[in-house]
Amino acid sequence: PPPSNRTLSASLVTRCRTLLSDLDALQSLLAQTQRNPQIVEVRSLRSSVLSELRTLEKLDAQVQEVEAAAAAAAEGSGTFDDDIGTRDEVRSRLGHALRSSNLPFYEAVWAIARGSCSGLVAFGKRFYWGSGAGDGEGKDGATGKGGMGKKRASRDKKKSVFVDIVADDGEEWVKVSTISETRLLFEMAKKGWEADGSEDEDGDAGGQPRTVLRNYASGDGGEGEGDEDDDDDEIELVKLARDMRKAADVTRVRYKTPRLRFVIPKIEEGSSSEIDGLLKIIRGYGIDVSCGGNVYSSSQGEPTQAETLVRLLPKPFKRFTPTLNVDCTLLLAAVSDLSHYKDIAPSPVHHTAINRQIDIEHTRPLLPTELWPAVVGHDLVCTKEAAQRMQEIVNIIGTETENQRMRILLGEGSFGDCNREELIQAYQKLSDYEIPADWKLPVMTVDAAPIIASAKNLAKLPPVYEKIEKVLSDINHSVFLYGWAAGVVTISSNRTVVKQIESIVEKNRGTDDSLEGPAIWVCDTARSLIGKEKGRK
């Protein structure tokens, strides 16, 4: 027999509190480990779960009130309020509300993320195609205060899909559906869809419902009235599959379209030929489909709560090469007094940008929270042009300590014969932070020109490099084309140039889905030199 309302409401409230606690634990770990905890979007799911908890607590209170009134009536010491219906009607209404709770869906999303995802980016994110394509929600350019803005926003939302889990540092989109087999079969019957093995084999689209589905598969993307009519006959899972494919096709993460995955835990594959036919259509969109209760399980056994949460943390360095190519922007950040002295205070004598960097540094210090975690353990190189530019800037405006750090960083002057341990000891004397022992100093200077020329001559670079090098300054040409030609990851805080390179690659992609530009990791924050000042030590 189904559980009583009292048992069900108590169970749902307890489970919802447990889920909320798990999400709070994840947010706490993000706050402890990430320079910017907001880099992982948990708030949307947490807000939904919190709202659900408040609803369930109200329902639980109503259930207790009804049961108490019923008990009192049974003992003859009270009356049941006839204004809200009979006792059974109220119990039925409350039972329906409890069974309709969204909690099982939220639990499924969390369990699937915990059991099969890593490198979490977001719970619940909207992606668009058409106008503003390729951007997440809030970045589609479809906002405005006037009527035109509202109409555009409304129109664009029709060309969007809501993804439940964005994982693998943006490279995987996961859609979760907790639809039951009974409900799915009912929807299929209601919309006139029937599986036909012969049609599956020969691709004939003779049946009308099959024609509707195949029209979407053709990807014509029309927005006429006919499409709206087709929507009425379309099965929700197929519509989601089509929409995810459309949005993914105009989204690139590190030059690749995201992998798509559907997880449907309440459907068992092989139990219904009609549903199996539907799953085949979904897979036809290039979507991996997982069904059944085992979708919650981890392939690596049963991890602890701590192991699970750590696996969900972003993995921004997972594709780093053993050697990293350091841009001039980060060479400067590594020697700046702003990055090393904790007691520098904002001052009217500083430029506004410097004061802003000082404020950020006090709350999220660049070297220990972002740059060192990225580079320690890697061999570090920079191009001759990047080193020269840094030296020019430091020699002109750098303080004495910034000049000293520059010589240590590059192993020059009196530090030319020092080993790594000696360089780190020298650096430590000029920093308030503990210098990591596995920071591989010095940064070795390389001659980029022959490496780039060889890659061009041997056709190691795709033809799009010609368009990219036309827009790059001499120093950026040496830095980014060297990394590309040498097959090493370049690290930089020059987000503007990186976006420019990515844009050129995408505009010239054509039909080449495998085209990739240089591998670049962008550091969130730049650091300037503080500059020479009178009276400063």
Image (cartoon, helix red, strand yellow):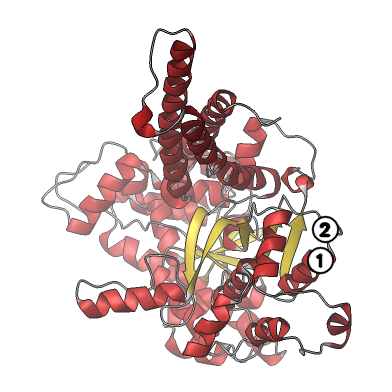
Residue 103 horizontal side relative to residue 433, left or right: right
Viewer-side residue, 418 vs 374: 374
Q: Residues within 10 Å of mark 1 (few under 14, many from 20)?
A: some
Q: Position of residue 102 (x, y in %)?
A: 53, 45
Residues tagged 2 and 1 counted as in contact (Cβ below 8 A): yes
Q: Which residue is mark 2?
A: 269
Among the 4 quarters of the image, the one containing residue 80: top left
Q: Is residue 35 visible?
A: no
In the image: residue 398, left or right of residue 345:
right
Q: Which of the image's four quarters has the N terminus?
A: top right
Q: Position of residue 438 (x, y in %)?
A: 61, 42
Query: Could you tell me residue 463's position as x and y percent?
Result: 62, 92
Find numbered disc 2 in the image and state the secondary structure of the residue it sits on: loop
Give the Cα distance between marks 2 and 1. Answer: 6 Å
Q: Which mark is residue 276?
A: 1
Residue drawn at the location 57% of the way across and 69% of the way down: 253
Looking at the picture, does residue 386 appear above or below residue 401? below
Q: Secondary structure at mark 1?
A: helix
Quadrant, the C terminus: top left
Residue 420 sits in which quadrant? top right
Name the mark on residue 81: none
Look at label 1 and name its amino acid: Asp
For marks 2 and 1 on the same chain, the one whose residue lies earlier in the sequence: 2
Q: Residue furthest left?
A: 348
Q: Residue at x 44, y 79 (%)?
A: 500
Give me the residue at 60% from left, 61% from top: 324
145 displayed left or right of 371: left
Please say whether residue 519 is visible from this viewpoint. yes
The answer to which of 159 and 37 lies nearer the viewer is 159
Decide: few, some or many residues near mark 2? Use Cα within 10 Å; few <14, some 14-19, many ≥20: some
Residue type (three-letter) at the residue carrying disc 2: Glu
